[in-house]
Amino acid sequence: MKDKVLSFFGLGYVGLTSAVCFAHKGFKVIGFDADPEKIKLINSGKPPFYEPQVENLLKEALESRFLSLTHNPAEAIEGSSITFITVGTPSNPDGSINLEQVKSASMQIGQALTKKKGYHLVVVRSTVTPGTTENIIKPIIEGYSRKKCGDTWGLCFNPEFLKEGSAVKDTFNPDRIIIGEFDKASGEMLEKLYKGFYEGEMPKTIRTTLVNAELVKYANNAFLAMKVSFINMMANLCQKLSGADVEVIAEGIGLDKRIGSLFLKAGVGWGGSCFRKDLEALLDFALKNNVELPLVEATLKINNLQPYKLIELAKELIGELNGKKISVLGLAFKPETDDMRDAVSIKIVKKLLDEGACIAVYDPKAMENAKKIFGKGVKYAESIEDCLKNSECALIVTEWEEFKNLKPQNFINLMKIPAVVDGRRIYDVESFSSKLRFAAIGLGEKKYYNPALAANAIIQKNNSILLVKRSIKPFKGLWSLPGGFIEYDETVEESLTREIEEETGLKIKPLKVIGVFSHPLRSPVKHVITICYESIIVGGELKACSESAEVKFFPIDNLPKLAFDHEKILRNYLKLKNTSCSNKKHAA
Ligand code: UDX
């Protein structure tokens, strides 16, 4: 079969990867693309995208002359006997499939086939909705060539299942080959081609109708996306349950052979060029056929919301994000690619900007693509270190290997406040949560081991106590003692003075510690140790600033109910005061 020359119409991701793999195996390949710039770039040995091994294979194919490129579609058809259609099938704005490129390739093939002598096989590899090969592609080619399908030319639909980042590996080791055939002769020829490609190790092959093969591709992507959305749904439940961890749930169900362990990694959601496009096209197609696909709808719905879970966790960890410096590690839709199509990072960065955060982003490969999307709104860091420097919270969005290698100490050394939200579950929960503020997708509350240290003040003026009502969670709308978390480079007194000035406008002086209290169930780090100071006012002016909605003195005999442990702390203090007052009276 190596005597057969192949041609590829469309040198995007699938077309070019397949072309260089065939060339590597000793097949003569002709590449055609409608974009002359792309042809020029590829001819110079540069793939128009990043994908492991493709550049090397391309150079090898050009040097060995097993791959040649042309601007002329007729030349590609004339010089080959099997043509793969590998053009893009993007979405229309309403989610339906856009078949323009497929139609135009079919037209060019049809025109060129008019003059062609000998049998020619056309293999559709672009993902198309069921019925497209038979009802759209075949009539176009027949119309332009004026040759009936099955006579001098054959037709197959042959879906690809390549994953970005491992496309070459997947081409050489596929799980199966699906051949949808117009007639036996077409299927036979394609199967023979693959037998030549895989030599003695032919993967399991299914030969079927065109429509079945088209459906297999959609069902495959819908199922994979549903699996990820399913585990993300469980992750959201785990996050609310003390002691729960979605990683264990995934391992537990993944060991059931009927379920399998792959595509059960919970995270901030799936992205990429295929899943959303294909699921939306499938939904649209089903709707036009009066069929509902509720599982596909739910899969999309879960995924639309999943990126925001990361922002919710960040807020639980460090409070409101307005004005805070946030580092986003990872922008590509998955590791080992520079592709940002439908990447969850886009939603995350946009939301962070809406919240008023100052954002630094870093990705080992996708920075150039990111600049086209985010423009001047964010800082493009040059390295992980540059991204984390002075940051108040780091968000892990893509699980690149170099992020996995970071240790808690790296974050502690670089960040202003070492707080990490693991959106891809790459860090060891125990070692991270015992050393820094840590939250992760699908990790229940009990997993926050590290206690946070807070300082609060009891400020009494005449017979009143100063209280604040905060607008941030978990204190939202509740009265509490003024104060806040102790930051890394401050003493407790400095922290308390700063926090109270930020909250109330008043300058205070902490006089003495009246107690240290531990509260295991309080956000953001769940276990909070509060140091409470009796303090006095030394200056400033009372006004609600920063995150407080109201600040007010309350008469001791008419105090509102206070949030969490603050109620108990204040009551204890007042009781002690009274006792000591009455003791003094006794003594007097
Ligand atoms: C997918 C299909 O896997 C492939 O068969 C098809 O031909 C094209 O679409 P691809 O888009 O390259 O491939 O990436 P894939 O590895 O499937 O990942 C898709 C998204 O799901 C990524 O954003 C990834 O991060 C996410 N994902 C995947 C998870 O969040 N959890 C998982 O367990 C697996």
Image (spheres, rainbow, N blue to C red):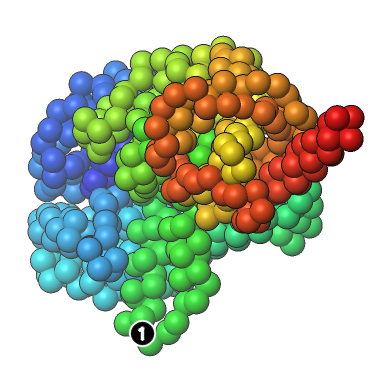
Q: Residue at x 31, y 25 (%)?
A: 379
Q: Nearer the viewer, residue 389 or 270?
A: 389
Identify which residue is drawn at 62% across, 22% down.
510
User: For mark 1, what is the residue?
Assistant: 289
Q: Nearer the viewer, residue 586 or 291?
A: 586
Residue 86 horizontal side relative to residue 391, left or right: left
User: What residue is at 76 percent from the left and 51 percent from the top?
Assistant: 242
Q: Nearer the viewer, residue 216 or 113?
A: 216
The residue under the point 61% across, 27% down is 535
Image-based side of 112 in relation to 313, left or right: left
Q: Is residue 539 above or below residue 479?
A: above
**Identity of the residue furthest to the bottom in this view:** 290
Could you tell me if residue 336 is visible in this image? no
Q: Is residue 382 left or right of residue 212?
A: left
Q: Quadrant of residue 574?
A: top right
Residue 175 spot, x, y in % from top left: 58, 49
| Kind of residue at badge 1 | Asn
- Judge whether 126 appears above or below 148 on screen: above
| Quadrant (top left/top right/bottom left/bottom right) for the C terminus | top right
- Residue 133: x, y in percent? 30, 68
Residue 163, position as x, y percentages in the image: 47, 43
